[in-house]
Image: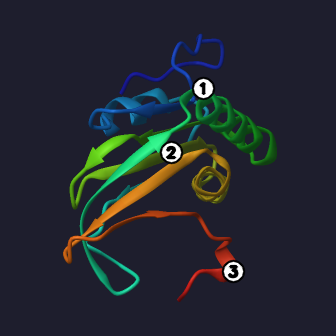
Amino acid sequence: MNFRDEHDEREMKRFALSDTLIDIASLRDTLLDARAGACASFEGWVRDHNDGRTVRGLRYEAYAALAEAEGERIVDEALAKFEIVDARCVHRTGELAIGELAIWAGASAAHRDAAFAACRYIVDEVKSRVPIWKHERYADGAAGWLHPQPEQEKPA
């Protein structure tokens, strides 16, 4: 492993949009740090159903400048709120097929609880605050835009 020390420069943005496949290994490598004893990550994939309908694929669109700024703000909040060493998040845009990775988030910390909490916070906040829109295509030929719902209102 190639650990960084706390004085290394961070060249990569902590939040990014991507119109290509997400390189999980490279993102994980950015979180390696001698101070970290844990890394938690989340992968959100395109599933084949939603609200009882068969999904054939989807497209994500974003207001890129605003999305990247808000995403960076969310990761900065996680760095301030949780005792983590570092964090990253990437969200796809464009056409995605069933099974493709749509979002990846990761956080490194001295201990796992902070890494898990920060990772969940980042994903939840990105889903609720970042201007990324999802357009699903269904097996019956219909299509529709989905809008995020607050967590407490989502069906079980």
- At horizontal 62% and vertical 43% (from top left) the residue drawn is 109
Residue 51 x/y as whole percent:
41, 83
Q: Amino acid at mark 1?
A: Ala
The foreground one among 117 and 46 is: 46
Answer whether residue 128 is visible to the viewer in this image.
yes
Residue in the picture at 50% in, 45% down: 106
Q: Which residue is mark 3?
A: 152
Counting from the top left corner in percent of width and height, residue 2 is at 39, 22
Indicate the secondary structure of the residue bearing disc 2: strand
Residue 7 image position (x, y, % from top left): 65, 12
Q: In this orientation, which residue lies closer to the viewer: 34 or 60?
A: 60
Mark 1 highlights which residue? 65
Q: Nearer the viewer, mark 1 or mark 3?
A: 1
Q: Quadrant of the N terminus?
A: top left
Mark earlier in primary sequence (1, 2): 1
Residue linked to disc 2:
106
Q: Is residue 115 above or below residue 36?
A: below
Q: Which amino acid does the dot numbered 3 rest on?
A: Gln
Picture quadrant where residue 23 is located: top left
